[in-house]
Image: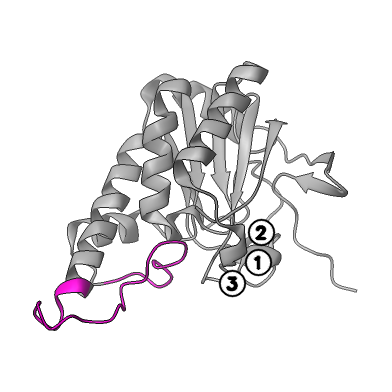
Amino acid sequence: MLIDRAYAPVVTLGPGQRIAVWTVGCSKQCKGCANPELWRADPAREMDDAQFADALIGMAQQGGIRRITFSGGDPFEQPESLARVLAAIRPFFDDILVYTGYTIEELHGFADGTLAHLRGMSHGDAPCAVPQSHQFPPDWTHHACLARKRTAVKTALGLIDALVDGPYVESLNDGVCAMRGSSNQRVHVFNDALRDDYNASLEQPRRIQNVHFGDTFMSIGIHGRPQEA
């Protein structure tokens, strides 16, 4: 998986204390994005999926944390890695939240084959455009790759408790909701046991958590729209 960083405890990206993960690679490149440095799918940021999952489990156990948020970048642009990591950590977390620039309709449509493709879906995984072998029909590897990605998206959706979907639209950043950057984005809660927690989080005002991480400072949370001069 292409990873920029993981940090805990985080209290500004979902209810309760959480681990937060920022993936690398996002083709949407929304104007005003808070993390444009994570747009490029940098191969140098790759980490083995199993090792990364083990690291997250270790962080959870060491800190007594059972909630986690995946942001980015766009985690769903790496569907196969995302599904593998989620499957490995699922028994150790009660609340898994994922942010994505895709809409839930796009993800379901891609997973069930209604949508032929989604832009950026090759980030972080082996791309579908691979050299063809004379042993197979000309489009065999392409369709096999798409099938893996469709299965991975469906699997990942089945492993999470909540999803914040949709691209960030700077003109719709009203500075109100603590869990989404612009009003077109939606918070989908799939786990009924967590619905009250998420409803309470949605009612909270925005806040930013400023932390020192390595040799840098980070501002974690949903930011307001930059003020024009």
The image shows residue 35 at horizontal and vertical percentages of 69, 61
The answer to whether residue 38 shows anywhere in this view is yes
Residue sitting nearer the eye, 138 or 110: 138
Task: Report, in whole angstroms, how far the alpha carbon at label 1 lies from the one at label 3.
Answer: 12 Å
205 left or right of 86?
A: right
Task: Give the residue number, with chain letter if any, for mark 1.
Answer: 170
Give me the residue at 26% from left, 62% from top.
110
Task: Give the residue number, with chain letter if any, for mark 2.
Answer: 173
142 in magenta: no
Q: In which quarter of the view is residue 72 placed?
A: bottom right
Residue sitting nearer the eye, 145 or 181: 145
Q: In which quarter of the view is residue 226 placed?
A: bottom right
Task: Report, in whole angstroms, how far the alpha carbon at label 1 lies from the one at label 2.
Answer: 5 Å
**Magenta segment range?**
117-141
Q: Secondary structure at mark 2?
A: loop
Proximity of marks 1 and 3: CB atoms separated by less than 8 Å: no
Q: Secondary structure at mark 3?
A: loop
Q: Earlier in the sequence, mark 2 or mark 3?
A: 3
Query: Eyeballing the image, is 210 above or below 75?
Result: above
Proximity of marks 1 and 2: CB atoms separated by less than 8 Å: yes
Dot label at residue 157: none
Dot label at residue 29: 3
The answer to whether residue 187 shows anywhere in this view is no
Task: Report, in whole angstroms, how far the alpha carbon at label 2 lies from the one at label 3.
Answer: 16 Å
Q: Secondary structure at mark 1?
A: helix
The image shows residue 65 at horizontal and vertical percentages of 60, 21
